[in-house]
Amino acid sequence: MPLIFYSRMYNRAAEKRKAPSLEDTDNGMHMLVVRESRNIGNEALLEWLASEDGKSFYQRAAVRMHEEVPTPENLSLWISSLISRDRLLGYVPNNSSPLSGSNLGDFFYILDGWQPTNRLQVCELMGFSMRRALGAAYILPTGRQGRAPENRLCLTQECHDTAASLLDTLLPGIHPPLHPFDWLSDQYWRMRLGGIDQGTAWRMCGELAGKENSGWNSDEWVFA
């Protein structure tokens, strides 16, 4: 069956009704990769992932992540697709320390096209980080008046559940040990999930890391 047929099938109207914020020209292929993440027998998909066309597809996704302000659902789908791609291509977590000193730094290198041997591990750890950020979000009340807490990531129930469910189906059941700079990854995702663009989030994370290295307590940082 042609690969483009699979893509269109997973971009069908029923999927869009369940998650309207996932309506996007590329999301059909991302959803296909996620759904097929444990099907190493899909030779057509494996061939496409390893091809120049497949590489260009993920490079385009990385550029969009840099240049756009995606919805929380799209951010969750994209990181889930990265995890699924690397699993299908045979990468395994190697339990190594971050090459740049933090998982966030390694993740940015991956988005820029660098393909380190620990890339699946980094993407999985960044997926756990996004899940922690989603878990700490304030769920906006439905159908009644309510004031959202200040300095909290605020999401609708539908938005939260769609983004969280994508990660919950992929991530291992046992949470890995935290790296000393994983708090920075969590803050990054709170900013991105809250609608802050990539450049601003990266700059703010750099400022936070500098304060941390100076003995500043990361718990004092207030998300706005």
Image: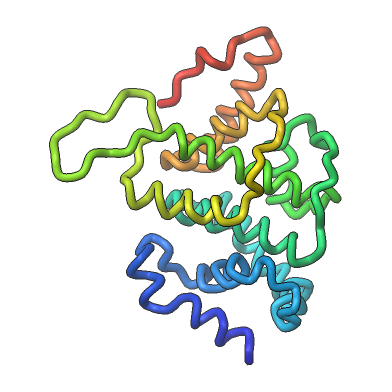
At 75% from the left and 54% from the top, the residue drawn is 113
- Rendered residue at 33%/69% (across/down): 17
Report the residue that reaches farthest toward the top: 215
**Measured from the top left, where is residue 208 in percent x and y?**
60, 21
Residue beneath the point at 46% across and 51% down: 163
Q: Position of residue 144 (x, y in %)?
A: 14, 39
Residue 166 position, x and y percent, is 52, 56
Q: Is residue 52 above or below residue 105?
A: below
Left or right side of 43 for 174: left
Which residue in the rendered view is the most extreme toward the front?
173
| Along the line of sight, the residue nearer the viewer: 206 or 22 | 22
Quarter of the figure with residue 59: bottom right
Q: How many marks?
A: 0
Q: Quadrant of residue 222?
A: top left
Left or right of 184 in this view: 180: right
* Front residue of 144 and 195: 144
- Left or right of 107? Residue 29 is left
Q: Is residue 179 above or below residue 61?
A: above
Q: Is residue 154 left or right of residue 46?
A: left
* Quadrant housing the N terminus: bottom right
